[in-house]
Amino acid sequence: MSDEILTTYDAQGQVTGTAPRDEVHRYGLWHETFHCWFVEQRADSLYIYLQLRSKDKRDYAGLLDITAAGHLLAGETAMDGIREVEEELGLQLTYDELIPLGIIPYSMVKEGMIDRERANVFLYDNPFPLDQFHLQPEEVAGIVTAEFASFRKFWQGDLQQLDVSGFRITDRGERIDVQERVDISHFVPHDTDYYLQIIAGIEAAFR
């Protein structure tokens, strides 16, 4: 929302003040976010969960992204970010259940927006079946999973396409199954290095 007030930082991570979210993105001010990646160990393999952003989102509409994520407002800590999981996915987690990967700084630039984030990144070993996900329609249009080994090869450049499966919500509010093959154009354009750091964190936590 345009009236959200965020804490701003310099490139070294020192607090510089606060500013409205629109101003933060217009001038490329560093700010903090919460990222939570769901993973699941099934009998056959490890899987990673991706959200499909709503087509009504102002930025990166209809693209695949972090399972749940959002901005941390001025005065908030990473612990407050857990609300994003409940708001976007309809699931109640506790902060103690999350596996911290630390702060990953990165930037995304597009016309009219310079997004410089200090992302507080976490993993969650997900026990919830997909039918227990209740999505926030204005934010999230679906949830899919991908085999982690393939996801790793995809971001390492060894696979050009990635198989995903799960569900999405239609314009009429119906939940339909999804099974498709996607390429890099279907993803929010986080730096490849960001994805590789997530992959390394997952490998360290679930080896």
Image (spheres, rainbow, N blue to C red):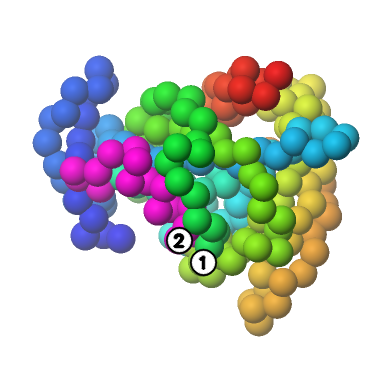
Callout 1 environment at 10 Å: few (<14), some (14 to 19), or many (20+)? some
Q: Earlier in the sequence, mark 1 or mark 2?
A: 2
Under circle 1, the secondary element is loop
Q: Residue furthest right?
A: 44
Residue 194 located within the stretch drawn in magenta: no
Mark 1 belongs to which amino acid?
A: Gln
Residue placed under numbered mark 1 in the picture: 136
Q: From the viewer's perspective, is 110 left or right of 173?
A: left
Of the pair 99 and 178, the residue shown nearer to us = 99
Mark 2, residue position: 87
Residue at point 64% right, 78% down? 173
Can residue 64 be spotted in the picture?
no
Quadrant including the C terminus = top right
83 part of magenta stretch: yes
Is residue 81 positioned above or below 103 on the image? below
The residue lying at 61 percent from left, 52 percent from top is 51
Residue 189 placement, left or right of 35: right
Residue placed at 57% from the left, 27% from the top? 198
Which secondary structure, mark 2?
Answer: helix
* Chain part drawn in magenta: 73-88
Q: At 67% from the left edge and 24% from the top edge, which residue is drawn?
A: 206
x and y percent of residue 49 in the render? 66, 44
Q: Is residue 11 visible?
A: yes
